[in-house]
Amino acid sequence: MQALNGALEQLGNPSSVHGHGQNTRAILEDARDQVAHAVGANRSEIVFTSGGTEANNQAIKGIYWAQNRKNKARKVIVTAATEHHALLDPIDWLVEHEGAEVINVAVGSSGMLDLEDLEQILSSRSEEIALVSLMWVNNETGVITDIVRVTELAKRYGIPVHSDAIAAIGHVPVDFAESGLTAMSISGHKVGAPIGVGALVVARDFSPVSLLHGGGQERGLRSGTMNYPLATSLGAACQEAVSDRVERQSRLKQLRDLIETEIVRAIPSAVVTARDTDRVDHNAHLIFPGTQSDNLLFLLDQEGVSVSAGSACQAGVLGASHVLVAMGHPEELASACLRITLGHTTTASDAERFIEAIIKIHPGALVASQSTQSAN
C-alpha cells in the first residue's frame, strides 16, 4: 500500500516527455526492474497487464497467431484439462474461431501431469504444434509441475512453452531465465498487490501477436496509457513475496499439515487430494464425501471463515471442480471439495478457528457427534 499510495501522489502520463511524465515513467521502470528481479527475467521481458487473465489471453492467442502465421500447419495447442479457465477458455476460443486443435496431456489421480505422455505427443505431432501451455502450480490442488523438464522436451522440436505461474510466484523458486519458458503469466493479487494488475513475461527473442493496438506501449504488446501506480504496487509485492519465501512457506507448511491432520482425524471420510504429491506448502485441498461444496462454503461463511471450492474466478458459479474431474474423481466428489489457502497473515489461531468451524458444521465429524452424545 505504501508503494501504491506514493505513486498515486504523482501525476503524469509515463509516455509524455515533460517532467511530470518522466517522473511517473521512472516509477514505472523501477517497478519493471523489481518484477524482473523477483522472477529472474530481463527488465525488457516484463509486460504489465491488468492481471492473469489478460496475460494468459495475450500469451495463448499471441503465440498461437505468431506460430500459425509462420506455418499454417501449426494449429495444435498442447495443454492439460487441469488448467485454469483463464487459460482453457482462450484456447476454446481459438478452437471455435481459428480452427485450432487441443491435445491434453494425461493427468494422474494425484494431479501430476504425465510427462511421458507429453513427450509422446511432442514427438508424434511436433510439426503441427504451435505451443505448449502448462501451469507451474495448480491453483486448486497446489500440485507442482516440473516446468524445466517440460521446456527441455519442447526445445527438442523448437516449440515455445508458456506457463501460468500465477500460483507459483512467492511459493516456489521461479527463475524465468533458467526455466526455458517463452512466456509466463503472473497476477498481482496473488502476491499481495491490489486486484487489477499483473504481467506477462515474454522472452526477448519472441514476438507474440498483440491483442491490443494503439500507441505501441509495452513492446507493442499492451497499447494504452501505462498504469504506473498499480505497476509499482506489483513490483513491491513481488519483491516482498520472494524475499521471505523460504521462512514463510516453512511456517505455513506447519499450519497446513496441522489443518489436514486434524480434519482427517475428526472427519475420517475426508480426503486430502494431493497429499503424497510434490505440492506447494500453503495450500490444502480436501474432498468431503457426502457433502456439497456450496453448502460447506455457506456454513463456513456463517462462522466467519472464507475458503474456496476451487477457483474464485468463475463468476460465483459453483459446480464440480474440473480439476478433480480431470484427475478421475466422479462429479459427486468433485462437487464436495474445499481449497484452503494460507497467506502471510495466517496465524495458528486462524488455522485452529478453521478446524473448529469445519468440525462444527460437518455432519460426520466425530468431535461433533461425541459432543452431542455427552450433552444428552
Image (cartoon, helix red, strand yellow):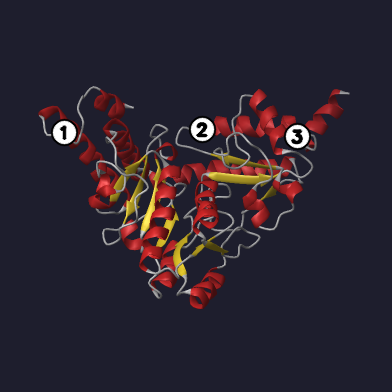
* Disc with the residue nearer the chain's start (1 vs 2): 1
Res 238 → quadrant: top left
Residue with the mark numbered 2: 347
Image quarter (top left, top right, bottom left or bottom right) of the N terminus: top left
Q: What residue type is disc 3 on?
A: His
Give the SS element for disc 3. loop
Give the SS element for disc 2. loop
Distance from disc 1 to disc 2, alpha carbons, whole Å, reads: 46 Å
Residue with the mark numbered 3: 362
Badge count: 3
Distance from disc 2 to disc 3, alpha carbons, whole Å, reads: 23 Å
The residue at 70%/38% (across/down) is 293
Q: In front here: 206 or 44?
A: 206
Q: Residues within 10 Å of mark 1 (few under 14, many from 20)?
A: some
The residue at 52%/38% (across/down) is 342
The residue at 37%/56% (across/down) is 183
Task: From the image, state whether disc 1 or disc 2 is nearer to you.
Answer: 1
Q: What residue type is disc 1 on?
A: Ser
Image: 311 above or below 279: above
Q: In front here: 202 or 372?
A: 202
Image quarter (top left, top right, bottom left or bottom right) of the C terminus: top right
- As drawn, the residue found furthest toward the right would be 376
Q: What residue type is disc 2 on?
A: Thr
Q: Specify whether residue 97 is in view.
A: yes
* Disc with the residue nearer the chain's start (2 vs 3): 2
Give the SS element for disc 1. loop
* Disc with the residue nearer the chain's start (1 vs 3): 1
Distance from disc 1 to disc 3, alpha carbons, whole Å, reads: 59 Å
Res 300 → quadrant: top right
Mark drawn on residue 16? 1
Q: Mark 3 and mark 2 in contact (Cβ < 8 Å)? A: no
